[in-house]
Amino acid sequence: MKIRIKQNALLCLVFSSMVMSSFSVAAGADPNEFPEPVTDGSGEAIGGLEPAVAAAEPQDQTSFLKGLASVIRPEGSVPGLLNDRFTTYLSDRVIFAQFERNAARYDLEQARVGVGFLFSEERDAVFQLGIALDAPGDLASNIRLSVGSRAYVVLIGDENNDAFAAGLGIEAAYQLPFERLPLEFGASLYYAPDVLTFGQGDRVVDANLSVTLPFRPQLSIFAGLRFLQVDTRPDDREIDNRVHFGIRWDLD
C-alpha cells in the first residue's frame, strides 16, 4: 500500500511539472526558471504548484494592460477645424444653420470664422458673424480651448424692437479618450454688455452646451441646449432656450 501511494504521488508530481512547463512555454518564459518544489523529510513535494501560479500572475496583468491600451487612444487634443464645416440644428421652437471656415487661408493660424442664422417660431431672426482663436493643442490633453468675438444682428418679431451687439466669448471642448466611444462635450459662452449693444437692446447672452458623436468620418450628430437672450426695452426676449438635435458636416 505504501509503495502504491508513493507511486501515485510521484505521478502527480511529474504531471504537475509537465503542466507548469506548458504554461511557461505559452507565456514565453523558460520552464527552468521556476523554483524547485519544496520537499519534506520523506522527499515528497509540498506546495509545488504555488511558485508556478505566482509566476503566471504578472503575465495575466500584462495581458490585461495591453487590452486596455488597445481601447484607450494616446492622449491628444480635440481636433480642430481643418477645412469647412456646416452645422444645423432644430428644436420645437427654432431652426439654426451655421457655416464655418478655417481661417488659415486668411493668414490666421489656429482660427476659424463663421456665419450663422437663427429663426424662431415668434418670427425672431438672428444673424451672427464670429471668429474664434484656438489655443495651442499641447496645453491640455483631449481638450480644446478657444476665445473669440461674435457680432449679432437681432430682428425681433415685434416692430421697432431690433438690436445690434458685439460680444466676447470663450469655448471649450473635451473628447473622451476612447476609440469606440469618442464623445465630444462642448460648451461656449458669449456676452455682449450694454456698452456694446445698440438699438433697442441692452445686452445679449448666448450660452450653449452640446454632446457630439461621430456618425461617419465627416458626419457627426449632436444634442444640445442653447440659451440665447436679448435684453430689450422694456422686457427681456428669450429667443432660444430649448433642447435641440442636429448634425455637423465637415466638408472637404
Image (cartoon, rainbow, N blue to C red):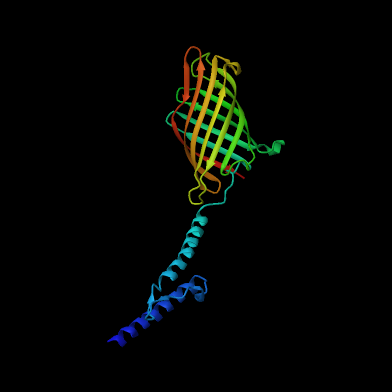
Camera-side residue: 130 or 169?
Answer: 169
Residue 196: quadrant of the picture: top right
Residue in the picture at 59% in, 20% down: 165
Residue in the picture at 53% in, 45% down: 219
Camera-side residue: 153 or 243?
Answer: 243
Camera-side residue: 37 or 113?
Answer: 37
In x, y percent, where is residue 94? 47, 29
Residue closest to the far top: 234
In x, y percent, where is residue 11? 37, 83
Report the quarter where the N terminus lies.
Answer: bottom left
In x, y percent, where is residue 212? 50, 41
Is residue 72 placed above or below 26 in the rendered structure? above
Report the quarter where the C terminus lies.
Answer: top right
In the image: residue 106, left or right of residue 156: right
Residue in the picture at 56% in, 44% down: 142
Residue closest to the far left: 1
Residue 171: quadrant of the picture: top right
Q: How many labels does the image show?
A: 0
In x, y percent, where is residue 227? 48, 27
Is residue 5 placed above or below 170 in the rendered structure? below
